[in-house]
Image (cartoon, rainbow, N blue to C red):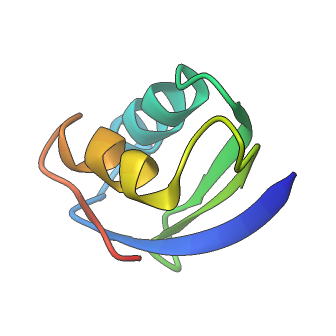
């Protein structure tokens, strides 16, 4: 398992937090996703053999008005 912290812009409230976390948790290979609204980032633990960081970025970028930086 790999654990990375990614910056995410566009998150402003608990709804945004839940939206990003739920989208990432639905991806096969993601074990956990935890958003920190104050720091505008998400910590993701995932299996690199099943999912790439680019796929995680696409997932976040397509679940609302958010943009994840790699």
Q: Residue at x 30, y 58 (%)?
A: 11
Q: Position of residue 12 (x, y in %)?
A: 29, 58
> Where, quadrant-wise, is the C terminus in this rendering?
bottom left
| Observer-nearest of 38 and 57 | 57
Residue with the most extreme left position: 65
Quarter of image, res 40 = bottom left
Relative to 25, say whether 51 is above or below: below
Residue with the most extreme front position: 49
Quarter of image, res 42 = bottom right
Q: Residue at x 61, y 22 (%)?
A: 28
Is residue 52 left or right of 12 when viewed as pictured?
right
Is residue 11 left or right of 18 when viewed as pictured?
left
Q: How many marks?
A: 0
Relative to 30, say whether 58 is above or below: below
Quarter of image, res 47 = top right
Is residue 48 left or right of 42 when viewed as pictured?
right
Q: Position of residue 24 (x, y in %)?
A: 51, 35
Q: Position of residue 61 (x, y in %)?
A: 21, 49
Q: Residue at x 49, y 64 (%)?
A: 37
Q: Position of residue 55 (x, y in %)?
A: 39, 46
């Amino acid at each position: 398992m790999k654990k990375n912290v990614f910056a995410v812009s566009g998150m402003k409230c608990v709804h945004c937090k839940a939206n990003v976390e739920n989208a990432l948790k639905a991806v096969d290979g993601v074990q956990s996703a935890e958003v920190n609204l104050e720091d505008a980032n998400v910590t993701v633990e995932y299996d690199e053999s099943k999912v790439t960081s680019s796929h995680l970025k696409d997932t976040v970028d397509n679940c609302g008005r958010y943009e994840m930086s790699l």
